[in-house]
Structures are given as structure tokens and as C-alpha cells.
Amino acid sequence: MSLQPSSRILSGRAPAKVNLFLRVIARRADGYHELETVMAKLPGLFDTVSCSDSWDEQLTLSVEPCYPASFAFEPVPVDDTNLVLRAARLLRTRTGCRFGAKLHLIKRVPAAAGLGGGSSDAATMLLLLNDLWRTGLTEAELLGIGAEIGSDVPFFVANSAAALCSGRGEHVQPISWRIPLPIVLVRPMGGLSTSNVYRACIPEPQGPSAEEFVSCQQHLGLFRVARGLHNSLQRAAESLSEEIGALRQLFQANNVISHQLTGSGSAYFGICQNARHACVIANKMRGAGVPWVWSGMTAAA
Ligand code: C5P
């Protein structure tokens, strides 16, 4: 009789994020942009990421889309362009581990949206595989691997509800975020390419400060925080997609406290007065024919 060790399955939630503040400071020689951004996780909007042992060295990925029927869009790749597979391969290279794994994603977070879906999946998979393969890397080491996968990945490796991120986004300073923000989040039919949006943006060497935005949140209320929203990438995104300007006008007409693009888009969000108000606005957005709409709260801790 051959004895097979039993297979372990590990799963986790990979939450989306919104950029409440994003100032592009300068274009860098390496093609990236120096920025300061404040990101908050959305615990109620997440992909489910899981991995299980494989008895050979193979890494395989399967993806199960789970979007509303109104939202038909680009399929998620299952080849090496998927950040989850890049995370698994990089973890093996850095640790010398030769194990394989079966990786699975249930996708609810729209891609090409500035919601960090792919980065969050990769970060969560990194944490799960570090456990499954017992590779024993520390959080600092995982943050380093995350930064190699993508600028937003370290934010999702770090166990914090919100953070002020700098450099190209990979330097993460967790912040205590006091006020959960009721938001309505929408994604138009078309996505936007992060690199195209950055290429079209005009840096703001002088401009509002992320630190002031954070301190405003620590000392003042929801309305002041909402008025401090900022995103240097919005104008560039509007120049690349007419859908973004149309969403701005739709939010304007719907009396939210304030609204803006998240990250490089194409998702767009508005801050509402409370959770009930967010539900009402979300229904209006659905009624206006917006293909993907979500309402909920940003994380606080
Ligand atoms: O780091 P990540 O792979 O997610 O970045 C995707 C693209 O977005 C980069 O290739 C670059 O064109 C652009 N980017 C940038 N400046 C940043 C982050 C991303 O120009 N701070």
C-alpha cells in the first residue's frame, strides 16, 4: 500500500483598495513615477484565493469569474502574466523551494480598474504559499518579494487597514485610520492600462500633502476627509477614456460628498453620508445603466 500525504488546502480573502489620495510628484529615470498615496482596503469587496499541495513541481492556476451578469469583460489570464503565478515562482526562486501547487482564484474585483485586484491576489497567495510550503519568510522578506511583483503588492502584504505609501508605491507606512468611509464604487465597461495613464499624467511637484490628508482624518470628521480627496491621475484617465468624464458628471449630479478616480482607474468612487445613502446612490447608478456597481465601507482600525 502506498501512503500519500494528505493534501492541505489554504484559502484567504484578497481585498480591493481605493486610493483616497494620490499625488504624482515626478517622473523617474527608470520609467516609474515618484508618488505619495493613501490607500484604504475594502474588506467587503474581495477575491477568494486558495492553494493546495501538488505531488509534482507543477504550478497550475484556475480562475472562476464571479461578476454580475451586467458586467461582461476581459477574461483573467491563467498564464505567467497573472501576478499570482509570478508570486509563486518568485517565492520558489528566492527560497530554493521546489514544491508545486494548485492555485485557484474566485474573481469578484474587476481588473484594469485601479482597485488593486491582481496585486492583492498576488500578495495573499504569497502569504498562503509561505505557509503551505513552510518557507518561513518574515513579513519584511515578503514585502521585498511583493515590491518585485508590483508597486501595490507590499500594501496588501502589510496587515493594515490603510497606509501612506511612497516611492513608486512600494514603501508602506501603516496608518491608523479612524473613520470608515461609506462609498459607492463603479467600474465602466472599459478598463484602463496603468502604464498608459501614468504616461499621460502631468506630475505635481507642488501640491496637496498626503501627510496633511492623514492628519485631517485623525482630527476632523467625514466631511473634511471627503473634501481632501485628490488624484493626480484623474485628468490623464479622462483624456484616455470618455467614460471617466461621464462618471464624474454622474456622481456630480447625484450629490455625493465628493468623488474621484481610484488609482489609475477606470473604477470611480463617491463618498456618501452613511451606508444607507451609499445604497441609495448605488441603486441610482444601476438605474443609470452603469455595468458594475458596489457599495460598502472602507476599512478602519
Ligand atoms: O508596478 P506595476 O507593475 O504595478 O506598474 C505598472 C506600470 O505602471 C509600470 O510599468 C509603470 O508604467 C506604471 N507605474 C508608474 N509609476 C508608479 C507605478 C506604476 O509609472 N509609481
Image: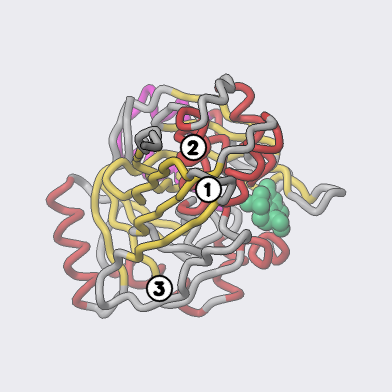
Q: Amino acid at mark 1?
A: Ser
Q: Where, by quadrant of the figure, is residue 68 drawn?
A: bottom left
Kindly tell me whether mark 3's CB lies below 8 Å from ligand 1: no
Q: Residue at 42% of width from left, 39% of height from top?
A: 40
Up/down of 95 relative to 249, above or below: above
Give the mark count: 3
Neighbor class of circle 1 (other Cα within 10 Å; few <14, some 14-19, many 20+) is: many
| Dot 2 or dot 3, earlier in sequence | 2
Mark 3 is surrounded, within 10 Å at the Cα level, by few (under 14), some (14 to 19) or many (20 or more) other residues, namely many
Question: Which is nearer the N-term, disc 2 or disc 1?
Answer: 1
The answer to whether any part of residue 48 appears in the image is: yes
Taking 264 as reference, is 229 above or below it?
above
The reply to whether the residue tagged 1 has its Cβ within 8 angstroms of ligand 1 is yes
Residue 19 visible in the shown view: no
Is residue 141 toward the left or the right of residue 30 in the image? left
Image quarter hosting the C terminus: top left
The amino acid pointed to by label 2 is: Phe
Q: Residue at x 64, y 45 (%)?
A: 89
Specify the amino acid type for callout 3.
Pro
Residue appearing at x 50%, y 53% in the figure: 118
Mark 2–mark 1 contact, CB under 8 Å?
A: yes
Q: Is most of the magenta stretch helix, strand or loop?
A: helix
Q: From the viewer's perspective, is residue 2 above or below residue 44? A: above
- Identify residue for label 2: 156
Viewer-side residue, 91 vs 205 = 91
Instruction: Give the foreground label among 2 and 3.
Output: 2
Q: Pointer 1: what residue?
A: 119
Point out which mark residue 188 bears.
3
First to last magenta residue range: 212-231
Q: Element at badge 2?
A: helix
Q: Quadrant of residue 195?
A: bottom right
